Image (cartoon, rainbow, N blue to C red):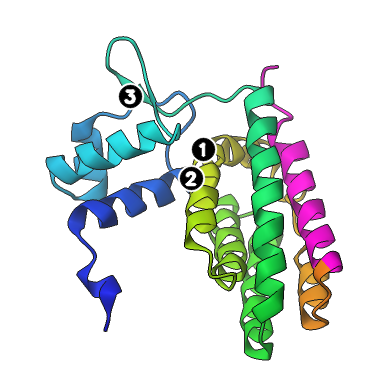
Amino acid sequence: MHHERKMPEHQAVYEKLRDCLVLGSFAPGEPLTIQKLTNFLEAGMTPVREAMRRLIAENVLQILDNRRVIVPVLTRSQMEDIYFMRLNIESELTRRACKSFKKQYITELSCMDVEVDRAIERGDVEAYLESNKAFHFYLYEAAESPILLNVVESLWAQIGPSLRVVSGRYGTANLPDKHSDLIAALSKNDELAAVEALKADLSQGLLLASQSLPQ
């Protein structure tokens, strides 16, 4: 059974739009109209409207008094709250993934980390954000906790636009990459060390992301 091939259009459009936000395709404060998104996503008005409604409910998009929808501009305290949740949920996902992590996953994860390193070396922010997301979510999917995974996707989408701006400003040299420590811990099935490495990675990300934000 290949359920993914039968994904309803509204779900596919929602995931595509959420991914665009994770990767910072739209800037903080940018207005998003249905017309603009139907063109950008090459999708129908109904699934786009539905996707926007869902993302507003998740606080990924913001609706203003005049009904206009924008990408939120985060304050530093909002960013810290998002990272607080990410730290706790992603630590738990890492713990659970550790229990079922197989040797072939390590190889796959190492290949993904090479892509992250290459993006950092090239100074390619977009490739960094894509490969870093692929790395983390490959790990989290091994936890087999779809509810937690969905929450994390939403948190990444809230933070993506700000992270893109900051990364663009400071370049890739300061971007978080504690992945080799994480891989080493996973290969030894060392749950504590894996969680520590993840926390270090996220803390570095928070430090960077909050640098340019208002209080």
Q: Secondary structure at mark 3?
A: strand
Inter-mark Cα distance, 1 to 2: 6 Å
Q: In the rendered image, which residue does mark 3 sit on?
A: 69
- Residue at 25 percent of width and 48 percent of height: 41
Q: In the rendered image, which residue does mark 2 sit on?
A: 154
Q: In which quadrant will I find the C terminus?
A: top right
Inter-mark Cα distance, 3 to 2: 17 Å
Q: Are marks 1 and 2 in contact (CB under 8 Å)?
A: yes
Which segment is the magenta one? Answer: 192-215
User: What's under tag 2, amino acid-wise?
Assistant: Ser
Coordinates of residue 144 in the picture (x, y in percent): 53, 70
Which comes sooner in the sequence, label 1 or label 3? 3
Residue in front for this viewpoint, 167 or 108: 108
Q: Left or right: 166 with respect to 130?
A: right
Which comes sooner in the sequence, label 3 or label 2? 3
Coordinates of residue 85 in the picture (x, y in percent): 65, 42
Report the magenta stretch's main SS: helix
User: What's under tag 1, amino acid-wise?
Assistant: Gln
